[in-house]
Structures are given as C-alpha cells and as structure tokens.
Image (cartoon, rainbow, N blue to C red):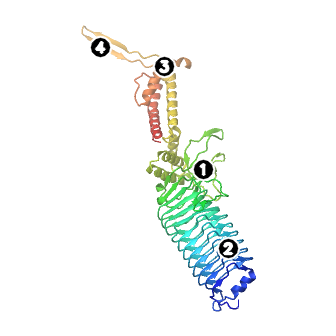
C-alpha cells in the first residue's frame, strides 16, 4: 500500500476484500489537490467483497473492470468519473447498486449483472455505448435524468420492480428491449432523438410527456400504456404482441405477469396525427383532450368499450341498451348520473367526469376517422354516441333535444332498422284500427240524381254524393273483414304518400291526413336504417 500513488494502475483480480482493506487501498490513492482518489487502469475481475464496495467520488483515468466480481453488500460508485470503459459484466451484488451522477466517457457494460437490491443510475452520463443485456434487477432500477450518448442495449433484461427512465435522453438508441418488468416501465418525459423500437412486457408503460423526435415503434405485452401529453413529431406505432419476445438466448421469461393484452389508458393531450394503434384494448382509454383525433388510425383487432348487456331495471322500467361501441368517458358519465346505472363503469379515482356537451365532439372526431378509413360499423356506432351526447347536452335548446329524442325513439337516429319498422307497423296498425272503428262510413255512399223536365227538349239532372254516415253500433261489429280490407288499403296508400280515393268519414279524413304525414316519414326512416345496416 505504501508504494501506491494517485493515478497508479491497480490489478486485484481474484482478491478477497473486506471493507477495511478496501478503505485502506483507496485512502492511499487520494490526490491532495482534489481530495478524491484517482486511479489509472483498474482491474477487479473475479474479486470478492465481503461487505460494501464503496468507490464514491473517484476518478479513473483509464479503464475499470469488475467482470465476474461478487459484492455481498452495497456497490457504490456515486459521482465517479471514468475516462475509459467500465466493465461490470457478470457482477453479482447482494444489495444495492448506485452510480448516481457518474460520468462514464467510454463504453459501459453491465451485461448479465445480477443485482438483488435497487439499482440507481440517476443522472449518469453515458458518453459511449451502454449494454445491459440479460441483466437482472431484482429490486428495480432508476435511470432518472440519465443521458445515453451512444447505443443502448437492454435485450433480455429483467426488472422485478419498476424500471424508471424518467427524463432520460436517448440520443442514438435504436432499440430498447425486449425487456421484462413486473412493475412499471416509466418513460415519462424521456426524449428519443433517433428512430427506436421499444419492446417490453410490463405491468404498465408510462409515456406521459415523452418526446419522440423521430419515428418509433412500441411492441408491448401485458402493459397498460399511458400516453398523456406525449409529443409525437414523427409517426409512432403502438401494437400488442401476441407471442413472447425472442432474444439470442431464447424466449424471454415472463414470470409474474398475467393477462397478455396490451391496453391504452389515456391519449389526452396527444397530437394523434402520426399515431397508429394496432390490436390494442381501448375499452378504458380516455380520448377527450386528444388533438387531431380524427386522424388517429386504429388497425387490427382493437377493442372498445361496449354498453351493458342484458336487461336492466331503472325504477319501474326495464331497459335494454342498444349494442354499440362507446367511450370510457360515456361510461363514467352514465355511472355517476344514475344511482342505479347497473353495468356502466364508474370513473377511477381522480378522473374528471365530462359532460355530454364535451363528449359529443370526441365522438364526432372518431366518427370522421372511421369514415375516412371506410369503416362503416365503427363510424355508425360513434355517430350514435354523438347523437346520444347531443340529446343529453345542456347547451342546446329543449326543442332540439325533443326532436332528437323523437328521432332516437322511432329509428335510433336512423341506424336501428328494427326500431323504425316496429314504429311503422305500430302506426299502421293503429291507423287501421282507427279507420275500422271511426273512419270507414257505415254504408258506402251511393250517388243520387234528381232531374227537372221542362218542355219537350230541356232536361236538367243533378247528381249528388250523400255525406258518409258515421258508423254506429258495438265496436266489435265494426271489426269486420270488409272494413279491415278498406282500412288497410287506406293505410298502405298513406304510407307511400298517396290518397286512397276511399270515401271516409270526417274522422277518417283527418286520420288519413295524419297517417300520410307520419307513416311516410317512418317508412323513409326504415329505408334509411336498412340502408345503413346493409352498409355495415
């Protein structure tokens, strides 16, 4: 130890260190001008540390290698500066690892490292390439504020807790993963300066305020993705991966993860102009607040929220909701509006519940997106949702809401053919019944002629039609086959906006006029609904 001077090279391959021995070694390397230990090249390959390995605030003028070393306690490299490469491959650490605020000018290799505690790389500046291939972080990892100037590899890395890359700058990284985390992969406020592919199997992937300055492709399993306020300067695609990831070492294990579906939690604040979502579960996704939502592209077998199925009781009424795709925000509104909103999903804690007036534009933009993509069924569902929100909105006059309610009741906004046909048949049946009871006269009027003979050549004849006689007698006697046939003829002609030419009582005349107006409209709505059904 007495012969060591600051800046000397160290070779302690296979050395067994105690905490006291390591402190004695590093003390002899302290530089008087700076008060910090300084070393040239340092080799600790296959060394063992019975306690903590503390190298805080050291400067390494050359390369440093801990390849295959075993550290029983903490491994601390806070604020170290390494001018060469750092080799940490295959190192086993029984507790915590910390490289906070370290500066590594060369390449850094952490492949196959096994860290039982937390791994802290907050604020580290990686000047060269960095490799974490097949590393095991059993206590999670924190890379908050780190900067990667070169390539980065995480293929096969496993995180038993959260993997946090908050505010990390990835300047040249081409791929992140495939990696596995039984916690959250946190990319909040991270910046990707080059085209990147992110492959991850995680419980959640947090991309809030993440900035992609180039194209990006996210391939995910199990994860719930939050894209709130993310910045997409170039096309970004997010897709669910059906099969486990494969690396050079084989299939990436996914122990501790359940439900392989990939879901999206929020698109609020995102400019969706360059966003493509494929095979994702969007049933809980928050779309409100998304910019250029009409340009969003949905591909593959994506899933949206649906209305509750089956029969539901509201007071004395038994209701059945029309099957359609909906937004999660509509679920939240309906669940909070009605005390007995059975089947509608309540909002998660802290989620704002939007009014129908705010949801109508969201449905409108999604409808346009589906129409531009020639997806008629999806467009029809979102048109229905838009009209529903307008019908319940408080910012339009009650007269308009009344018209929308009638439009909904008789034809489901021109989209429910069965409802329109049922209303048409009901109206026609009621008209036939009214005609049989009051509209068809008791007797068919017979023209009568009266004449006056004057002289030998002049004859004056006047023909008059008697006023139809209102039917009388018991109602059952009026429900005859003959009266039904005449009434049906009147109703069918009325439905196509034609006059039947049938002699009618005063009541029958007004009933025919009303039926010519209402049944023609109902027939038109039924045809429109059938056309929309065929297009879907």
- What is the distance, in whole Å, between disc 1 and disc 3 at their CAs? 51 Å
Residue under the image location 50 percent in, 25 percent down: 432
- Does label 1 or label 4 sit earlier along the sequence? 1
Residue under the image location 42 percent in, 22 percent down: 502
Q: Residues within 10 Å of mark 2 (few under 14, many from 20)?
A: many
Residue on which disc 4 sits: 460
Residue 252's place in the image compared with 300, above or below, is below
Residue 285's place in the image compared with 4, above or below, is above
Q: Residues within 10 Å of mark 1 (few under 14, many from 20)?
A: many
- What is the distance, in whole Å, between disc 1 and disc 2 at their CAs? 45 Å
Q: Residues within 10 Å of mark 4 (few under 14, many from 20)?
A: few
Horizontal side of 239 relative to 454 (left or right) equals: right
User: Which mark identifies residue 483?
Assistant: 3
User: Which mark identifies residue 331?
Assistant: 1
Quadrant position of the N terminus in the picture: bottom right
User: Which mark identifies residue 97?
Assistant: 2
Rendering quarter of residue 163: bottom right
Proximity of marks 1 and 2: CB atoms separated by less than 8 Å:
no
Q: Is residue 287 visible?
A: no
Name the mark nearer the viewer: 3 or 4: 3
Rendering quarter of residue 41: bottom right
Name the mark nearer the viewer: 1 or 4: 1
Residue 242's place in the image compared with 81, above or below, is above
């Amino acid at each position: 130890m007495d012969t060591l001077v600051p800046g000397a090279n160290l070779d302690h391959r296979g050395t067994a260190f105690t905490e006291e021995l390591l402190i004695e070694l590093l003390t002899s390397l302290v530089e008087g001008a700076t008060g910090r230990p300084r070393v040239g090249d340092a080799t600790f390959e296959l060394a063992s540390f019975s306690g903590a390995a503390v190298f805080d605030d050291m400067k390494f003028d050359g390369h440093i290698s801990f390849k295959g070393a075993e550290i029983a306690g903490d491994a601390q490299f806070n604020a170290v500066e390494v001018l060469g490469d750092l080799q940490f491959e295959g190192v086993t650490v029984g507790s915590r690892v910390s490289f906070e605020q370290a500066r590594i000018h060369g390449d850094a290799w952490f492949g196959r490292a096994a860290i039982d505690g937390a791994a802290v790389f907050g604020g580290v500046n990686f000047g060269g390439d960095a490799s974490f291939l097949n590393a095991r972080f059993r206590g999670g990892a924190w890379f908050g504020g780190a900067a990667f100037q070169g390539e980065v590899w995480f293929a096969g890395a496993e995180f038993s807790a959260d993997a946090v890359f908050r505010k990390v700058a990835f300047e040249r990284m081409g791929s992140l993963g495939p990696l596995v985390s039984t916690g959250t992969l946190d990319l909040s406020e991270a910046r990707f300066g080059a085209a990147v592919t992110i492959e991850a199997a995680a419980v959640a992937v947090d991309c809030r305020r993440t900035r992609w300055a180039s194209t990006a492709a996210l391939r995910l399993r199990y994860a719930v993705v939050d894209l709130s306020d993310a910045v997409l300067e170039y096309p970004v695609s997010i897709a669910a991966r059906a099969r486990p990831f494969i690396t050079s070492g084989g299939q990436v294990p996914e122990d501790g993860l359940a439900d392989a579906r990939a879901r999206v939690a929020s698109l609020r604040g995102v400019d969706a102009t360059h966003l493509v979502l494929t095979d994702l579960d969007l049933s809980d996704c928050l779309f409100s607040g998304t910019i250029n939502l009409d340009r969003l592209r949905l591909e593959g077998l994506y899933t949206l929220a649906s209305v509750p199925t089956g029969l539901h009781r509201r007071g004395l009424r038994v209701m059945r909701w029309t099957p359609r795709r909906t937004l999660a925000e509509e679920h939240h509104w309906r669940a909070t509006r009605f005390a007995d909103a059975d089947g509608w999903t309540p909002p998660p804690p802290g989620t704002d519940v939007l009014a129908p007036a705010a949801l109508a534009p969201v449905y409108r933009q999604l409808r346009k997106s589906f129409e531009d993509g020639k997806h008629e069924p999806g467009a029809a569902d979102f048109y229905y949702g838009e009209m529903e929100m307008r019908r319940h909105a408080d910012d339009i006059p009650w007269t308009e809401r009344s018209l929308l309610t009638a439009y909904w009741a008789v034809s489901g906004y021109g989209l429910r053919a069965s409802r329109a046909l049922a209303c048409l048949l009901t109206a026609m049946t009621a008209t036939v019944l009214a005609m049989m009871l009051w509209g068809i006269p008791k007797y068919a009027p017979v023209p009568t002629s009266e004449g006056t003979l004057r002289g030998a050549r002049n004859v004056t004849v006047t023909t008059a039609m008697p006023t139809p006689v209102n039917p009388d007698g018991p109602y059952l006697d009026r429900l005859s086959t003959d009266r039904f046939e005449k009434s049906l003829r009147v109703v069918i002609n009325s439905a196509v906006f034609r006059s039947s030419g049938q002699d009618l009582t005063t009541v029958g005349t007004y009933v025919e006029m009303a039926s010519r107006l209402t049944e023609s409209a109902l027939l038109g709505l039924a045809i429109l609904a059938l056309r929309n059904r065929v297009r879907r």
